[in-house]
Amino acid sequence: MRLVERGIHARAAAAASALVLSFVFTHGAARAADKTYVMKLGTATINDSQHEWCKEFVAMVEKDSGGRIKGEIYPASQLGPIPREIEGVQFGAIQGYIGPPEFLVGVDERYEVLSAPGLITDMAQGVRAASDPQLQKMMLSFGAEKGIHGAALFVAQPSSVISRDPIRHLADFKGKKLRVLAADMQEEMVKRLGASPVAMTLGDVLPAIQQGAIDGSVAAMTVYTTMKFWDAAKYVTETNQPFIFSMSFLSKKWYDSLPKDLQTILDKDAAKASASINPWEVAFFAKQRQIWAQHGELISLPANEQAEMMQSFAAVSADVAKRKPGLDQAYNVFAEVAKRTK
């Protein structure tokens, strides 16, 4: 009889323990599902495609997550200069940075591959290349071992050169000090024009031009207009090389801490926002060219000199890529995508 009673008590205790554990796990899962995650996104620019991408992405994520992720957007380097924002993403201090991948060459040298001049020739091809699954898969995979989760890739626009004095011919580049992104391909490109490259973050460019520390910059039309560069320099030479791409980089530390369903939402919405922003940027770029023409001068090189420049640039990318095995492999992928989307 006592053995029977003991068995009954043991089963009752086991059932009670199971009930408690079930409550704990269920309650814990419910709490995880109810938890709100803050997503701070930083970018160096304002009122351009990168800023617009952030707006669309945040709206999508907040809706699809049912408010479990709350987005905060900080344009115009409000979270610090670009290197600090990138470090913040790596260490999880902020959740995302949006900008040209070339700024992350210190994280992975392959990020500079999209600076290869001469491969992308117009906005339509840029949109097709940015949407190519092979290129997206490669670019978004970089940085995973350094705290970066690649989320999105989209085209920005062609580069141009803003300058204090007009650059109307290739010979006018000689002796100029021009700001570039911290990428060997951009530096080599400028050197072959006979100018001196100066790597500099965006926030330093305008005061450097105003003070005469540099003669001009390789940058984006939409930067010149939204930040009113015409107060410092009136001339933009439309070299259209290299094309500028933007990427969204999320903190891998933060991303990995999220429930799986939220990770899926982030990746899907990042891709959706990129598909949406590409045509938006095409129209925006055209409008910004018109705005600049009202405040300064747009210059095109003579056709024969533009062709000469492009021929010179054709060898830049391959020459630089050959110096670094990893970059060379990435360049071959990009070159193949560019050929396929031409």
Image (cartoon, rainbow, N blue to C red):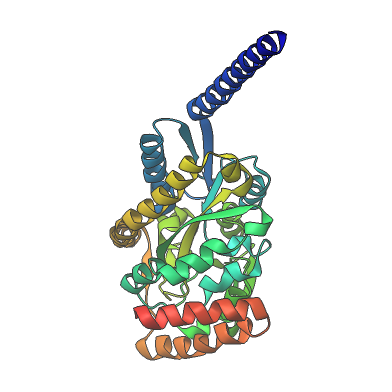
Please name the residue shown 47% across and 40% down the image: 262
Counting from the top left corner in percent of width and height, residue 240 is at: 41, 74
Please name the residue shown 42% across and 88% down the image: 305
Whether residue 102 is situated above or below residue 3 in the rendered picture: below
Residue 277 occupies which quadrant of the picture? Answer: bottom left
Residue 173 occupies which quadrant of the picture? Answer: bottom right
Locate the C terminus by quadrant. Answer: bottom left
Whether residue 29 is situated above or below residue 128 in the rendered picture: above
Counting from the top left corner in percent of width and height, residue 60 is at: 36, 41
Locate the N terminus by quadrant. Answer: top right
Please name the residue shown 45% across and 47% down the image: 264
- Residue 76 in sight from this viewpoint: yes
Counting from the top left corner in percent of width and height, residue 327 is at: 62, 76
Left or right: 165 in relation to 126: right
- Residue 178 in sight from this viewpoint: no
Whether residue 163 is situated above or below residue 64 in the rendered picture: below
